[in-house]
Amino acid sequence: MALFAGIATPPKVRQLQRTLYRKAKADKRWRAWSLYGDLCRRDVLETALAAVVRKAGAAGVDRLTTEAVKAAKEMFLDTLQAELREKRYRPSPVLRVWIPKADGKQRPLGIPTVKDRIVQAGLLLVLQPIFEADFDDGSFGYRPKRSAHGALDAIRKALWQGQTEVIDADLSGYFDTIDHAGLLRLVARRVSDGSVLGLVKRFLKAPIVEEKDGTRSIRPNDRGTPQGGVISPLLANLYLNSLDHGVNDHPELGARLVRYADDFVLLCRPGDGPALYERLKTHLKRKGLQLNETKTRLLDARRERFRFLGFEVSWRRSRNNGAEYPHVEPSPKAKANLRDAVRQELNHWTTWRSSTEAIRTVNRIVQGWGAYFHYGNSAAAFNGQQNWLCQRTRRWLWQKYGRKLGQYTFFTTERLYGQYGLAKLPLYSARSR
């Protein structure tokens, strides 16, 4: 899980997770009946606190920050552990904020308090291995040792195998429309501990608080699992697990479903798409979910390109040997997003900053973008981005130091990389690594 990246999980916690996973994997009917005591363990809570503090993030409705929790770690854990053991702990309301989207709309983000995030992280430590035993191989989002690159590998493999008709799906407000009762039934199939089930239910039912123009409104939450909650990705994966298995466990369908959280594509043999599209809508309707008809497409990947997780997938013919292949590179939107982020740091209103500080910030942006998008056939796209980055940095330095001539002769590419330490995107194909 990304939440626990860089966190050293104690050996006893790892052993607990292995035990839970093996029991669940060995017996599909096995149910965990004494998890609450494991949640209350000091080493579990310490690991959860370390993960939440490392990830930082905004404060919730109580205004308590991760920095304050870190400063009083032992006292905080003593109090929280006592609350949990004595069954006095109750989740606080979730603070809702609205995040702008590229299309001009907004999406809701729920921010639990730091204390609630720590308890959710503890729950994640004990619940993840149980449900991981049930999850389908076609699910790649927010799971240990899985990534967007793995999802793209699965897509390319399906295309190579002739599953070139694609349902490029988009769910309408997935995280906000999950049915609580249906989700809790799925949790109860593997967990019989009433205290843990009650805690999960209270997290789901936590009221929503919005603050606008100095006024605060509180409303009940009867559906959904807020994006921003630590345990939300696990529960969201669980709710769609039946969809994954419903496609991938039936080879007679000749189809492959590849999913990353609520983003997924269904690849099938030419001509099978319309029937599978109707079956997909029926299945989602039974779960109280709905496809966004304006964004969901049925397409032929040999003639049309589609985008998934920021990448663009298209069917091309190699210039080297004439063979056809699935070509994967960063999408135009992804490339534009990088340029927009760099422009925010290197513009005429930022020339007051030191070049060291500005380029250090740009390097973090570029290296993070490059690490994610260095996949498939990215070399040509990266080359174009690198040329643009050099030009943008060169012009910013030229303006900063007020030079009239010599933009290219003084701020040479060698100087940008050497003296100023500008980051380099990997300009070799990810396939050759």
Image: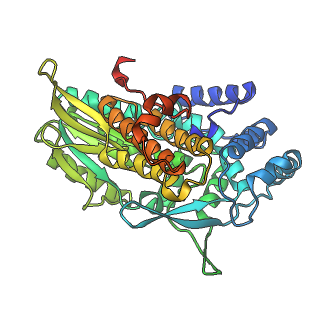
Q: How many marks?
A: 0
Please determine whether, in this image, residue 274 is positioned above or below residue 251: below
Q: Position of residue 159 (x, y in %)?
A: 22, 31
* Coloring scheme used: rainbow
Residue at image position (69%, 41%) is: 51
Q: Nearer the viewer, residue 67 or 367?
A: 367
Residue 32 visible somewhere in the drawing: yes
Q: Position of residue 15 (x, y in %)?
A: 69, 25
Q: Nearer the viewer, residue 376 or 142?
A: 376
Locate the N terminus and report the quarter of the image it occupies.
Answer: top right
Please determine whether, in this image, residue 79 is positioned above or below residue 47: below
Position of 16 compared to 138: left or right?
right
Q: Nearer the viewer, residue 72 or 355?
A: 355
Residue 313 sits in which quadrant? top left
Residue at image position (70%, 30%) is: 9
Q: Position of residue 152 (x, y in %)?
A: 34, 33
Residue 307 sits in which quadrant? top left
Residue at image position (39%, 36%) is: 386
Residue 36 visible somewhere in the drawing: no
Position of 425 compared to 318: left or right?
right
Position of 64 compared to 198: left or right?
right
Q: Nearer the viewer, residue 87 or 384?
A: 384
The residue most toward the front is: 404
Locate the C terminus and report the quarter of the image it occupies.
Answer: top left
Residue 273 sits in which quadrant? top left
